[in-house]
Amino acid sequence: MSFSAQRMQCIDASGIRKIFALAAKLKNPVNLSIGQPDYDVDELVKEEAVRHIQAGFNSYTQTWGIEELRDAVGAYYQNKFGVTLHNIMITSGVSGGLFLALMATVNPGDEVICADPYFVMYKHLVNLLGGVSVPVDTYPHFKLTPEAVEAAITEKTKLLVVNSPSNPTGVTMNKAELQALADVARRHNLLVITDEIYESLSYDDAPATMAGMYENIIVLNGFSKSAAMTGWRVGYAAGPEEIIQHMNTLQQYTFVCAPSFAQKAAVLALKADMCAKVDAYRRKRDIVYEGLKDVFEVVKPGGAFYIFPSPPDKNGDAFAQKAIENNVLIIPGSVFSEKKTHFRISFAAPDDVIRKGVEILKGLVG
């Protein structure tokens, strides 16, 4: 007799985590696989966390999160759309917020549209909940268009997931493009979840958000990428009051609350100036793009810290395996897609590591 639940047949171990496990076995790999910043948490943010730890702020908080941080998030979005504390909650990272949002909204059989390529969690969480993931092919430009969404909508469609800037492609959508998706959702009475964790890492245009474009939008954001607080597990959700209340109820029985001291420090992190970090990642983006563009088919990313190339033979999975055999860690494209034509590079790495990795990858072509 197996004690495993049937729902575990719906998901597999993350392909990204498998690469991380492999990395631990390699000697000095050229690691272009990691989806977290290569800079550390700001010293002032660390000091703020330590100050609250030493002051004894180490217990549970309200499930919603501390009012100070919710106020700060509300102020951040006030210029984009009208929110109150009843529309905002603090989550255990954006991943936690995504899980709660899907748990609160997806019934068995509900169809959930997302772009293909997609962040790994979208498809698997929907399947875990008994929903039906509907990946919409966005190759070769990697932008979800209103026409493609319209074509994928059926009577069972309930939800649209948007991610800009995108993981794994780094492609960003401008305000007009996002508004066009919001308009489709409004016409068909769909709920939208917009994952904006990379919003602050936009290189060519001002960051665009779907906040305020449509009343039935849940905005997810956090501090893992902008403030490098990946291990602190602090994010936030803003959206329709009814859904946020359901998410809060679910959090009571799952995550309970985001870490208390981390919430205090996040108030300071929310005010951080991102200009220097954005400039640094723009430079890294240019290094990897300019190095790859003459050998690989590649779209120049406008945000995040990923690029999603395809080798000349269009077999991204095989190329990723060859790269790993040559001590360069990249992620096979099939981890993020129904296709196997591409692979993901993270340029959240020192410049010299990026250059070395690019040269090795170019040498593997042929």
Image: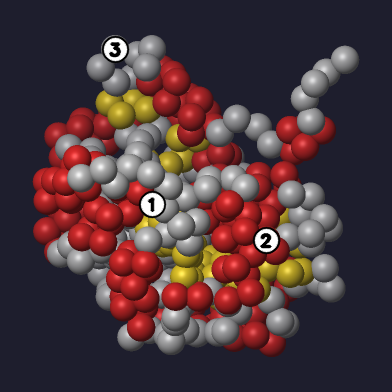
| Amino acid type assigned to the residue bearing label 1 in the image | Val
Element marked by disc 1: loop
* Residue designated by label 2: 104
Quadrant of the snapshot with the C terminus:
top left
Is residue 334 left or right of 166 when viewed as pictured? right
Residue 234's label in the rendered image is 1
Quick check: marks 1 and 2 in contact, CB under 8 Å? no
Q: Residues within 10 Å of mark 2 (few under 14, many from 20)?
A: some
Q: Residue at x 38, y 44 (%)?
A: 59
Query: Residue 216 appears at what percent x and percent y?
Result: 60, 79
Mark 2, mark 3: which one is toward the viewer? 2
Q: Residues within 10 Å of mark 3 (few under 14, many from 20)?
A: few
Mark 3 and mark 1: span between their CA atoms? 33 Å
Which of the pair 14/60 is nearer the observer? Answer: 60
Taking the view exactly as shown, the residue that stands out farthest to the front is 56
Which of the pair 63/320 is nearer the observer? Answer: 63
| Amino acid type assigned to the residue bearing label 3 in the image | Lys
Query: Of the residues under marks 3 and 1, which one precedes in the sequence?
Result: 3
Q: Quadrant of the rendered structure where residue 282 is?
A: bottom left
Q: Residue at x 26, y 61 (%)?
A: 267
Is residue 11 left or right of 51 when viewed as pictured? right
Total labels: the figure holds: 3
Q: Is residue 34 visible?
A: yes
Quadrant of the snapshot with the N terminus:
top right
Mark 2 and mark 3: span between their CA atoms? 44 Å
Taking 7 as reference, is 72 above or below it?
Answer: below
Is residue 211 left or right of 72 when viewed as pictured? right
Query: Of the residues under marks 1 and 2, which one precedes in the sequence?
Result: 2
| Amino acid type assigned to the residue bearing label 2 in the image | Ala
Q: Residue at x 26, y 43 (%)?
A: 56
Residue 305's label in the rendered image is none
